[in-house]
Every structure is written in structure tokens, then in C-alpha cells.
Image (cartoon, rainbow, N blue to C red):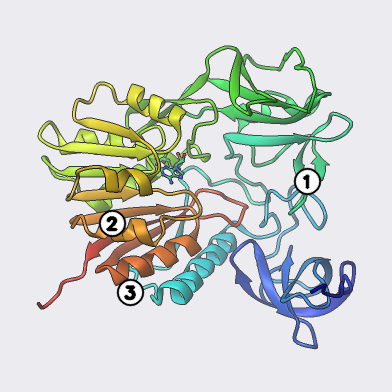
């Protein structure tokens, strides 16, 4: 059955009173007729003119940008970045918000997800309701922290480097990204032209002076000779196989955390904020309290960050099993932890490898899944291992809250939850939940 196309509302404007913040970097508002709008570039309590950016007459909700602020919030500041604002760069959601208020908004989002998806109050989740700033992110008023050690630049039709607009493939050309770490800015990516290139991923390791760019050529595009302001290793994404190939220099960068050096190769995962890896290792170890002789699991282990920290603490009589799906990350994890005899890294998806292993118990577990979370089957399997404590590291509070609900169904509850602002000026936030088995009377 064919449905009639409905009228697009893009470009329509509504004067609205802005309601609470919602997950995703926007706030909720309603038109006079009760239509729900998700409005960016605004703050709770403001009165704004919202211009629709996505949605039709029949859409369940509409997306909008605040294009005029009639009554500003006391938390509003002039956006320091000239490329932020309606219709411009989609990278930062909270350029127009005071840093303390950004963290408060993130806290409100976490609280809402916990309430809605896990049925937990902050107290029940063992959380004081705060989002802690990353160490070293104290910057003078009116400036933003330059924290991103990994930036993906998109290249426009004229070969200029920029960043993608919100929910769009269009490129906002820029001459400087304020949240890029100095090591990224110093490469001068924005200063040169990139004909025949679709994107440039720039990495400035925080644990060493290693710098890397990964070039993705346009279809049929030739690779330029890369001369940047600083020495870098250069990689390229193959047009046919979409794999990353070395052009020159080291095929990895070296990072540091918890006193160890980690090699991170070819697009492998490493936390983007320079303080993130240490902050998370500290929070996880404080929560798990590993003991000598423990059997520990590090799931979604990347290049072995938590496995390395756990192995040092469980000692010679303990053991650590890491599971990671990326082949390259597994090679790096094995290399990074080769001095630790009692560590084993298995390659494959957690949901496939876990049932295959003969492991039927663990003392402590850390899981750090991608945004989608772990899911019901994995949670059920983990709960069956009877761990004393489980640390759940989450970059999406919605997936975390959903999985906490599954854990509750399997007899585990959060004893402690902490939140960290490891992505300042964006809506993203990192949480660490420490789960314990609920005491039963039976
Ligand atoms: C958020 S990262 C965490 C990595 C590591 N714990 C760290 O902090 O550096 C998630 C990792 O899970 C891996 N991954 C994604 N889906 C997976 C799955 N189904 N099973 C195993 N690993 C997976 C990704 O390749 C990535 O390395």
C-alpha cells in the first residue's frame, strides 16, 4: 500500500518555551499545538525561535535549531567557536553553555536514563548525581579545553578541511578546531588543501610524541605527498578493501596509562581525552578492588588497557582473560601485555567467544562495550559467572541503563556509579558502574 507523502516542515519557525535537556545534545520543547521538538543550540528555560531542521506533518517529533534567543538562560555564554551554531559544525553541542552547567546537563541526562530504563534513582544507583571534570580541564572563562587527541576532518569539494555539519554529510570548513588537542592543531591540517581526499583522521598521542594521519582518498583519488608542520606517520584507507595500509612511518602510536605503554595501531580504539585512560583505570580499580589470585575478565578489551592494569594487581597466582573483536587490536593487546604471563587475549565477539570458553566462573569482570552496550544475552552469561564485582564502563548512558536493568533481572545491582566529563563541550559523557550481587535471603 502506498502512503501519501506528507508535507515537510523544514524551515517553519515556532516560538517556544524550552523544557528539559534530552539525551543527544538537545532540549525538549512543545509547539502551541503540542508537537514535540528536539531543539539544539538552546538551554532549559529559554524562550527561543526554533526553526525546523527535520520532520514532516506526520512525524512523531521534529528536530529544530534555536535561531533566535528571546529570553536567555543564566547558563548561556557566547559560543567561543565561530564555527558552532545553527547549520554549522555538528561537533560540539554545548559551546554556548558554561562548563559547570554542561556537566549538570549531562548529569540530568544520566539521571533520566537511569530512571526511565533501569528504574533507579541516583541513590539506588550509588551515584551522588555529579559529573566530574577531567583532570587538567580548568581553562580561563570564555575558553574551551583543547582535549581531542583524535579528530576526523572531512574534506569539502574544494579540498578544504572541515568538520561535518549536524546529521549531515555537508562539510563546515574550519581554520581551527578549538577542542582539538595542541598536538593535532600543530599538524596544520586545516592550512593546506587536500584535493582527491575524502577525509583525514589526525591522531596526536598523549602518551608520546607520536603523530599519525590516516587518509581516505576519494574514489579514484591519488594520494598527495603529505608535508605537514610536524613529522607524522601516514596511513591510507584502501579503496578496494577499505583496510588501513601504511604509507610511511610507524603503523601505530604509543600511549601511556597506569604506568604502562600501549601500542595502538591502525584505527584501533584509544580514549580520546588525554586524561581518560588513567581516570577510567583508577575508577575501575577502585571499584573492583582486585585481590591477588583473582580470575579477571576484560571484555571489549581493545589494546589491553584494563587487562594490563588488572594483571599487575591479581599477580602471578591470578589470571586475566581479555576478549576483543578487532584483529588488529588483539595483536596490539598481545604485544602490549607480552611481559605478563597470566594474561590471555581471545579474538572474536564477546557474545561468541564467552560461551565458547570453558570459563564458568570469574572473581571480577570489567566490560567496556561500544555505544550499543552489551545486551541481554551477554549480561545473562556474565551474571552466571558469579563475579564478586563487575565494572561496567559506558560511553552511552542509555545503553548502560538498559543493561543495568538486565543485570538487575540477573541479581546484580550497582553499588556505585561515577560519571566523568571526558568529552567536554559535547553531550557525551562516560560512566563507570560497579555492580555487586544482591544479597538474597534464600
Ligand atoms: C569502548 S572500546 C573499549 C576498549 C578498551 N577497553 C579501552 O578502554 O581502550 C570498545 C571495544 O570493543 C570492541 N568491540 C566492539 N564490539 C565488540 C564485540 N561484540 N565483541 C568484542 N569486542 C567488541 C571494539 O573493537 C573496541 O575495541
Q: Residues within 10 Å of mark 2 (few under 14, many from 20)?
A: some
- Asked if one can make out residue 127 in the rendered structure from this viewpoint, the answer is no
Check disc 1 and report its element: helix, strand or loop.
loop
122 relative position to 355: left or right: right
The residue beneath circle 2 is 381
Q: Residues within 10 Å of mark 1 (few under 14, many from 20)?
A: few
Q: Quadrant of residue 279?
A: top left
Question: Which residue is rendered at x = 60% and y = 44% of the image?
Answer: 145
Question: Which residue is rendered at x = 11% and y = 40% of the image?
Answer: 293
The residue beneath circle 3 is 124
Q: Quadrant of residue 338?
A: top left
Q: Residue 333, percent across and down?
A: 36, 28
Nearest to N terminus: mark 1 or mark 2: 1
Q: Are the residues at dot 2 and dot 3 in contact (C-beta closer than 8 Å)? A: no
The residue beneath circle 1 is 169
Quarter that holds the C terminus: bottom left
Mark 2 or 3: in front is: 2
Amino acid at each position: 500500500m502506498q502512503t501519501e507523502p506528507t508535507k515537510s516542515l523544514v524551515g517553519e519557525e515556532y516560538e517556544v518555551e524550552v523544557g528539559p535537556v534530552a539525551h543527544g545534545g538537545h532540549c525538549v520543547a512543545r509547539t502551541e499545538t503540542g508537537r514535540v521538538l528536539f531543539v539544539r543550540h538552546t538551554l532549559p528555560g529559554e524562550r527561543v525561535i526554533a526553526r525546523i531542521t527535520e520532520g514532516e506533518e506526520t512525524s512523531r517529533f521534529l528536530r529544530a535549531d534555536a535561531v533566535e534567543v528571546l529570553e536567555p538562560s543564566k547558563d548561556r555564554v557566547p559560543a567561543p567557536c565561530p564555527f558552532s551554531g545553527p547549520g554549522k559544525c555538528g561537533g560540539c553541542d554545548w559551546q554556548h553553555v558554561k562548563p559547570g552547567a554542561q556537566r549538570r546537563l549531562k548529569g540530568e541526562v544520566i539521571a533520566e536514563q537511569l530512571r526511565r530504563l533501569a528504574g533507579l534513582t541516583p541513590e539506588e544507583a550509588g551515584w551522588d548525581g555529579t559529573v566530574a571534570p577531567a583532570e587538567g580541564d580548568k581553562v580561563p572563562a570564555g575558553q574551551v579545553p583543547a582535549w581531542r587527541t583524535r579528530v576526523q576532518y572531512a574534506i569539502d569539494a574544494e579540498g578544504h578541511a572541515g568538520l561535518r555539519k549536524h546529521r549531515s554529510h555537508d562539510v563546515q570548513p574550519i581554520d581551527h578546531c578549538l577542542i582539538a588537542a595542541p598536538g593535532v592543531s600543530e599538524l596544520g591540517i586545516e592550512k593546506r588543501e587536500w584535493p582527491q581526499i575524502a577525509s583525514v583522521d589526525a591522531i596526536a598521542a598523549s602518551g608520546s610524541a607520536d603523530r599519525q594521519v590516516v587518509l581516505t582518498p576519494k574514489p579514484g583519488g591519488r594520494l598527495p605527498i603529505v608535508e605537514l608542520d610536524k613529522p607524522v606517520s601516514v596511513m591510507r584507507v584502501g579503496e578496494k578493501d577499505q583496510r588501513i595500509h601504511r604509507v610511511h612511518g610507524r603503523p601505530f602510536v604509543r600511549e601511556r596509562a597506569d604506568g604502562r605503554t600501549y601500542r595502538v595501531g591502525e584505527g584501533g580504539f584509544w580514549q580520546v581525552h588525554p586524561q581518560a585512560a588513567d581516570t577510567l583505570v583508577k575508577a575501575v580499580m577502585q571499584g573492583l578492588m582486585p585481590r591477588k589470585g583473582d580470575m579477571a575478565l576484560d571484555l571489549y578489551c581493545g589494546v589491553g588497557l584494563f587487562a594490563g592494569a588488572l594483571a599487575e594487581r591479581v599477580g602471578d597466582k591470578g589470571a586475566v582473560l581479555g576478549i576483543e573483536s578487532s584483529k588488529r587490536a588483539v595483536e596490539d593487546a598481545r604485544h602490549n601485555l607480552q611481559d605478563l604471563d597470566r594474561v590471555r587475549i581471545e579474538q572474536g565477539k564477546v557474545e561468541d567467544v564467552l560461551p565458547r570458553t570453558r570459563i564458568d566462573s570469574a572473581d571480577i569482570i570489567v566490560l567496556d562495550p561500544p555505544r550499543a552496550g552489551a545486551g541481554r544475552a551477554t549480561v545473562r552469561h556474565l551474571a552466571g559467572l558469579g563475579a564478586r564485582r563487575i565494572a561496567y564502563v559506558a560511553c552511552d548512558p542509555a545503553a548502560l541503563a538498559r543493561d543495568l536493568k538486565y543485570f538487575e533481572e540477573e541479581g546484580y545491582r550497582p553499588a556505585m556509579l561515577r560519571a566523568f566529563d571526558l568529552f567536554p563541550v559535547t553531550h557525551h559523557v562516560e560512566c563507570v558502574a560497579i555492580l555487586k550481587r544482591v544479597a538474597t535471603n534464600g
